[in-house]
Image (spheres, rainbow, N blue to C red):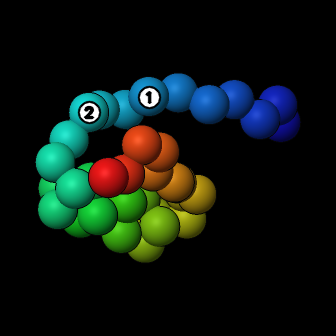
């Protein structure tokens, strides 16, 4: 399978953390960029 990056959403940091945790629970690797 080819690695492909897509943007799911632009969220607040708190919401991004929640979404990232949910994706990880489902076995989907995720990461955040431009976190300031």
Residue 1: image location, x then y, percent: 83, 36
Question: Looking at this rendering, what residue extends furthest in the right direction?
Answer: 1
Residue 29, compared with residue 34, is above or below; it is: below
Mark 2, Cα crowd under 10 Å, few <14 / some 14-19 / many 20+, is few
Residue 12: image location, x then y, percent: 16, 48
Q: Label 2's element? A: loop
Residue 4: image location, x then y, percent: 69, 29
Q: Camera-side residue: 20 or 32?
A: 32
Q: Residue at x 29, y 64 (%)?
A: 17
Q: Residue at x 77, y 35 (%)?
A: 3
Does the rendering let one see residue 35?
Answer: yes
Read off the residue under disc 2: 10
Q: Camera-side residue: 7 or 23?
A: 7
Residue 17, compared with residue 9, is above or below; it is: below
Residue 25, compared with residue 12, is above or below; it is: below
**In this rendering, would 11 be left or right of 7?**
left
Residue 7: image location, x then y, percent: 44, 28
Q: Label 1's element? A: loop
Q: Residue at x 22, y 56 (%)?
A: 13
Mark 1, Cα crowd under 10 Å, few <14 / some 14-19 / many 20+, is few
Q: Give the spatial CA distance, label 2 vs label 1.
A: 8 Å
Does the rendering let one see residue 19?
Answer: no
**In this rendering, would 7 be left or right of 2?**
left
CB contact under 8 Å: marks 2 and 1: yes
Read off the residue under disc 1: 7
Question: Looking at this rendering, what residue extends furthest in the front direction?
Answer: 36
**In this rendering, would 11 be left or right of 34?**
left
Q: Residue at x 17, y 62 (%)?
A: 14
Residue 5, compared with residue 32, is above or below; it is: above
């Amino acid at each position: 399978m080819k690695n492909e990056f897509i943007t799911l959403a632009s969220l607040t940091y708190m919401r991004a953390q929640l979404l990232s945790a949910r994706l990880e629970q489902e076995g989907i690797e995720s990461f955040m960029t431009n976190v300031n």
